[in-house]
Amino acid sequence: MSGRTWYRRMRDWFKDNVPERLVFDGIAVLVVIAVLAIELPRLFG
């Protein structure tokens, strides 16, 4: 099995089993955590 086929199967499984809303919420949470990790030390430092 080639790498591209493996990737496509994983992507299709992910799309079928994980709600789109959950993916976007997860990305939003990660962005907020990243911004806080960068900004908090600067505010209190």
Image (tube, grey):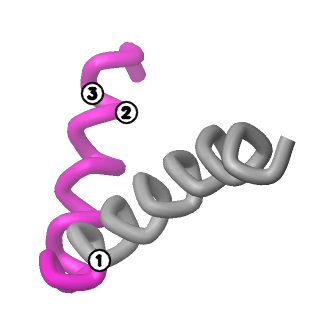
Q: Is residue 15 magenta?
A: yes
Asked which quadrant contains residue 27, the reply is: bottom left
Question: What secondary structure is found at the residue carrying circle 1?
Answer: helix
Question: What secondary structure is found at the residue carrying circle 3?
Answer: helix
Q: Which residue is mark 1?
A: 25
Q: Residues within 10 Å of mark 2 (few under 14, many from 20)?
A: few
Tell me: residue 18, above or below residue 3: below
The residues tagged by marks 1 and 2 sit, at their Cα atoms, a distance apart of: 26 Å
Which image quadrant: the C terminus?
Answer: top right
The outermost residue toward the front is 44
Residue name at image x 17 percent, y 66 percent: 15
Q: Which residue is mark 2?
A: 6
Q: Which residue is mark 3?
A: 5
Residue name at image x 71 percent, y 38 percent: 42
The residues tagged by marks 3 and 1 sit, at their Cα atoms, a distance apart of: 28 Å
Residues shaded magenta: 1-22
Residue name at image x 28 percent, y 19 percent: 4
Q: Amino acid at mark 3?
A: Thr
**35 left or right of 19?**
right
Q: Amino acid at mark 2?
A: Trp
Q: Amino acid at mark 1?
A: Asp
The residues tagged by marks 3 and 2 sit, at their Cα atoms, a distance apart of: 4 Å
Along the viewing direction, whichever of 16 and 6 lies nearer the viewer: 16
Q: Residues within 10 Å of mark 1 (few under 14, many from 20)?
A: few
**37 left or right of 30?**
right
